[in-house]
């Protein structure tokens, strides 16, 4: 059937007015000209998008004249299904898909224009890392300190900005193992061209270059796409933004749907500024605000709206609902993180058993992955079925399994599975062929374990050269650790293994968000080890935890990060860990200042608005971090919640919801001072030149309510590098320290 004939069969009596509120209807009916739809959480943005596409089709537009892009295949499928249903299945031909799928389709048609063949291959992350590793080795760069993941992250940021190697400015110069990262990027791109290959970042990057450098191709697509629709516009990076802007300059009929208050992916390239400057980019643009929420109660929306109003970089809107007020948000102050997990488990049981609430409609949303362990173990102890959404269970994570493998080998030298897992982690140049030789030797000599086989092969002179040295060094470490003093605690023992195996050093060398999270998980493992007297006790505990499989049940509590929860909704949401340093993340505050705080606040907004009927925010006055208790300060976000929409519940004497912490500020200072006078840690020597920013001077003694006393070691604007006596070196904003 010809495209035009399709639309003659579409029923033109679809009544949008009866199914849409006035703001939604406005966004659906006004199809000419640029339009920004600010769609708050739970306001029906997908309904608006699909209804708008259906309306455009009903006006007689060919499907092939519509471009609709989103971020996930799931969202694209949902949109396609809804449009097909609304139009009686006459929507085939729409250019509807993810950014990458649409970009790939365009690039296939014009590959020679960017130096590729039309049958180019798209390499995945593992192939990308393998190629980068080859370049690193060829350039004689120390792979242990400068690994492929780190280089991939640097190159990825440039591609997100739409920059090929020749466009990366000198101001973005980055050293990578004694070489210019820009030059390595140039070599990498040349290798990809030689392979007739692209990575995921190239799909959009080459599309942008294609349109910028080929006016005839650009005009062709500008004529083709009469209407452009974009979902989750606040999550676009600079390259995607520039690509869309070029395509839209033809007909100017671009509709971007998004929520600046839910822009939480700055760490992976998303630019909230793209949505904030929409009206400047497209002259005469209309803005429709979707503020009526169909998900949450009035108290939840009031709290979320009041919180996010503290952000300066936003276009502004206020969520409301016609539903009842519901229960106020419960703000729970607990003594420590154990009490936090206990409270959540007890409350879940109560909601399920006394009120009949479904477990699948309850979720625990954490800021950082390491927080999940205490909840997992508490739920197991209470026989509460759960699933970790968007990630692995704590003891299934690679770094945790690596450390456990070290302990298993310490405990049982015949544990070949543990040996195989960690013999080359960190990398020691021991590959599959060497492992096979251990197995073969063991089978030929009375079924020796792989460790004993390696030891015997060294003694017999079979293993020589670099591999022999690596195996000998590894076995020496194993023997040394086995002979460590028995009076060492389990935590001290594992800290020694982590240090001498260079495992933590390996993660630090990656210098990535992922590696930072893995280090936090290891710190949480050390915290868990404090509860066990022996390694044997701990390994038995882990085996029992790992054997409990509750994933075959449908009715389970969800545990996930707030980032993973975006787009989901639950009847009941628990939000633990609302403390300074944890949430907002200290790293975000230190690295990005006000911009980082605002993204963290948007994340808090996302967390609260996942709740439909009830939300619990928890703050622990004390939290164990890396084998020591630290007093916690309530998150600044707690102070920004409206009094009329929260109910404060104090689970212990002496706790406080005030930012000054459960202890008074003066008492914390005095406690740190007493500890410091009893035992001073070594402080790095300071440069004798008195560098100052006007408020603080290098070498000056300062106090931080969380980290205690320390000395300023460097200054950069309002950011200070401070070596704290107990917490080590931290980057802090000057307003959070006091001169002493």
Image (spheres, rainbow, N blue to C red):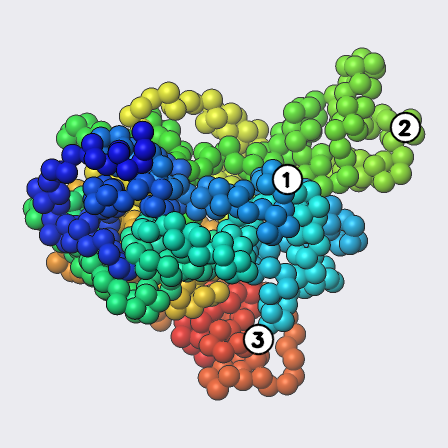
Q: Mark 2 and mark 1: span between their CA atoms? A: 34 Å
Where residue 56 appears, as percent x and y from the top left, is 24, 46
Q: Residue at x 30, y 68 (%)?
A: 283
Residue 564 visible here: no
Disc 2 crowd rating (10 Å Cα; few below 14, some 14-19, many 20+) is few
Note whether 24 is above or below 551 in the view shown: below
Q: Residue 714 carries which label?
A: 3
Q: Residue 345 carries which label?
A: none
Towards the viewer: 688 or 594: 594
Disc 3 crowd rating (10 Å Cα; few below 14, some 14-19, many 20+) is many
Q: Which mark is residue 462?
A: 2
Q: Name the residue under label 1.
A: 127
The answer to which of marks 3 and 1 sits earlier in the sequence is 1
Element carrying mark 2: loop
Note whether 352 is above or below 18 in the view shown: above
All told, the count of numbered labels is 3
The answer to which of marks 2 and 1 sits earlier in the sequence is 1
Which picture quadrant has residue 644?
bottom left
Q: In this view, does 554 lie to the left or right of 152?
A: left
Which picture quadrant has residue 165?
bottom right
């Amino acid at each position: 059937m010809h495209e035009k004939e399709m639309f003659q069969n579409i029923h033109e009596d679809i009544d949008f007015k009866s199914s849409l509120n006035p703001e939604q209807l406005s966004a659906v009916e006004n199809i000419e000209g640029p339009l920004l739809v600010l769609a708050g959480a739970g306001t029906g943005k997908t309904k608006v998008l699909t209804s708008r596409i259906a309306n455009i089709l009903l006006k007689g537009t060919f499907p092939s004249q519509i471009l609709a892009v989103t971020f996930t295949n799931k969202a694209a499928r949902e949109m396609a299904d809804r449009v097909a249903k609304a139009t009686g299945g006459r929507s085939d031909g729409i250019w509807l898909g993810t950014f990458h799928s649409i970009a790939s389709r365009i690039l296939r048609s014009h590959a020679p224009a960017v130096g590729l063949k039309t049958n180019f291959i798209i390499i995945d992350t593992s192939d990308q890392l393998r190629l980068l590793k080859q370049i690193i080795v060829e350039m004689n760069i120390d792979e242990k300190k400068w690994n492929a993941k780190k280089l991939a992250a640097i190159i990825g940021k440039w591609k997100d900005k739409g920059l090929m190697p020749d466009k990366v400015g000198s101001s973005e110069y980055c050293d990578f193992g004694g070489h210019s990262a820009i030059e390595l990027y140039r070599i990498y791109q040349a290798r990809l061209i030689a392979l007739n290959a692209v990575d995921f970042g190239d799909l959009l990057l080459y599309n942008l270059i294609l349109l910028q450098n080929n006016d005839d191709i650009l005009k062709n697509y500008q004529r083709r796409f009469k209407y452009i629709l974009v979902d989750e516009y606040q999550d676009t990076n600079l390259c995607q933004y520039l690509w869309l802007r070029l395509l839209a300059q033809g007909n100017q009929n671009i509709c971007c749907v998004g929520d600046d208050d839910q822009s939480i992916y700055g760490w992976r390239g998303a630019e909230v500024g793209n949505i904030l400057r929409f009206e400047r980019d497209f002259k005469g643009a209309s803005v429709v605000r979707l503020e009526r929420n169909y998900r949450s109660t009035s108290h939840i929306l009031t709290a979320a709206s009041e919180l996010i109003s503290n952000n300066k970089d936003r276009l502004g809107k206020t969520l409301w609902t016609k539903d009842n007020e519901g229960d106020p948000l419960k703000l729970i102050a607990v003594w420590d993180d154990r009490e936090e997990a206990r409270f959540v488990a007890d409350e879940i049981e109560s909601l399920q058993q006394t009120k009949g609430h479904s477990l699948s409609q309850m979720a625990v949303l954490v800021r950082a992955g390491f927080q999940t362990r205490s909840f997992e173990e508490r739920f197991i102890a209470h026989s509460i079925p759960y699933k970790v959404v968007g990630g692995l269970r704590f003891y299934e994570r690679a770094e945790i399994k690596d450390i456990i493998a070290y302990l298993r080998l310490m405990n049982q030298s015949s544990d070949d599975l543990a040996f195989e897992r960690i013999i080359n982690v960190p990398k020691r140049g021991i590959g599959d062929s060497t492992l096979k030789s251990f197995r073969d030797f063991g089978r030929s000599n009375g079924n020796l374990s792989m460790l004993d086989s390696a030891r015997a092969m060294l003694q017999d002179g079979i293993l020589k050269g670099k591999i022999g040295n690596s195996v000998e060094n590894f076995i020496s470490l194993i023997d040394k650790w086995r002979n460590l003093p028995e009076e060492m605690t389990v935590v001290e023992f594992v800290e020694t293994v982590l240090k001498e195996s260079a495992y933590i050093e390996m993660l630090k060398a990656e210098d990535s968000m992922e590696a930072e999270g893995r280090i936090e998980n290891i710190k949480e493992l050390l915290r868990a080890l404090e509860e066990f007297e022996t390694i044997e006790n701990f390994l038995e505990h882990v085996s029992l935890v790992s054997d409990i499989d509750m994933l075959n049940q449908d009715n389970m509590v969800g545990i996930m990060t707030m980032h993973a929860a975006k787009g989901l909704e639950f009847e009941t949401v628990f939000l633990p860990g609302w403390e300074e340093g944890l949430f907002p993340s200290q790293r975000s505050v230190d690295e990005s200042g006000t911009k980082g705080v605002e993204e963290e606040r948007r994340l808090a907004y996302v967390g609260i608005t996942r709740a439909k009927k009830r939300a619990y925010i928890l703050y622990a006055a004390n939290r164990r971090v890396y084998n020591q208790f630290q007093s916690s300060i309530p998150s600044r976000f707690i102070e920004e919640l409206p009094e009329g929409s929260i109910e404060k519940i104090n689970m212990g004497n002496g706790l406080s919801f005030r930012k000054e912490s459960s202890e008074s500020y003066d008492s914390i200072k005095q406690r740190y001072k007493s500890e410091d006078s009893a035992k001073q840690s070594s402080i790095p020597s300071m440069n004798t030149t008195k560098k100052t920013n006007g408020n603080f001077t290098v070498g000056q003694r300062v106090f931080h309510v969380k980290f205690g006393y320390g000395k300023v070691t460097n200054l950069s604007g309002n950011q200070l590098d401070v070596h704290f006596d107990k917490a080590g070196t931290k980057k802090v904003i000057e307003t959070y320290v006091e001169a002493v």
